[in-house]
Image: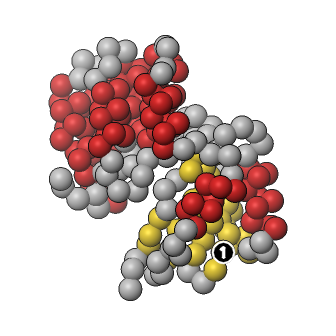
Amino acid sequence: MPGTIRSRRLVLKGMPVRESAVVYADSRGWELVSYREADPLEGVAEELMWRAADGIYFYYTVENASGAGCIGLIGKGVELPEGVQEALEADFDVWTVTELLAAVDGSDSPREYAAAVLRAALGAPVEFAQEFFARITDAMRHPDFMVRDIAVSAVAYPAWAQFRPVLREVAGNDSAERVRDNAARILASFNRVGVPEE
């Protein structure tokens, strides 16, 4: 029997985004099973979760740093039905994989670039994807330390084992103490949640 299986996290476009998730779930008669209120001081994001079927949950959450609304599906002890990811992508206005990558490549300023990298990390595939990995790790070596810091934080979303060597490099060698400390914190979180060694 499978454990917990997640779909790709979908990053919503436009506003309002929370209401679109609520209306979507309500229109299908899904039961709201949990609600977590945001606590920015504690770094806790708002999250709502509905039971879509036995063992399958639909969620909406907000990424604290960017304020981006995200949706996805979680299967607890069951496989996600074929086609459900594609159905969500069709029913919501979300950033596609192509758009996420193009936004990183087309950024005109460090601020825009950092925001695009964070958004790409949020919407990255569940399984390792070289095109996302390359862009995020490039940002971790950017001349602007704020871009590097945001890119290091963004690594926590895909949480691929392949990031471990890069995080170690940054934690040991980055010129900014803040970035070094952040990389060490993300590595510690990898250890806590059981992200394997590469």
Instruction: Identify the residue shown where x is 33% and y is 48%.
Output: 129
Eyeballing the image, is 17 above or below 172? below
Q: Quadrant of residue 152?
A: top left
Q: Residue at x 79, y 75 (%)?
A: 29
Residue 115 in the image: x percent, y percent?
A: 51, 28
Helix, strand or loop at mark 1 = strand
* Callout 1 crowding tier (Cα within 10 Å): few <14, some 14–19, many ≥20: some
Q: Is residue 54 above or below residue 31?
A: below
Q: Could you say which quadrant of the image residue 145 lies in?
A: top left
Q: Is residue 88 left or right of residue 8?
A: right
Q: Is residue 187 visible?
A: yes
Corner quadrant of residue 30: bottom right
Please state which of residues 117 and 48 is positioned toward the viewer in this rendering: 117
Q: Is residue 164 above or below residue 99?
A: below
Disc 1: which residue:
52
Relative height, residue 93 to residue 140 (above, below): below
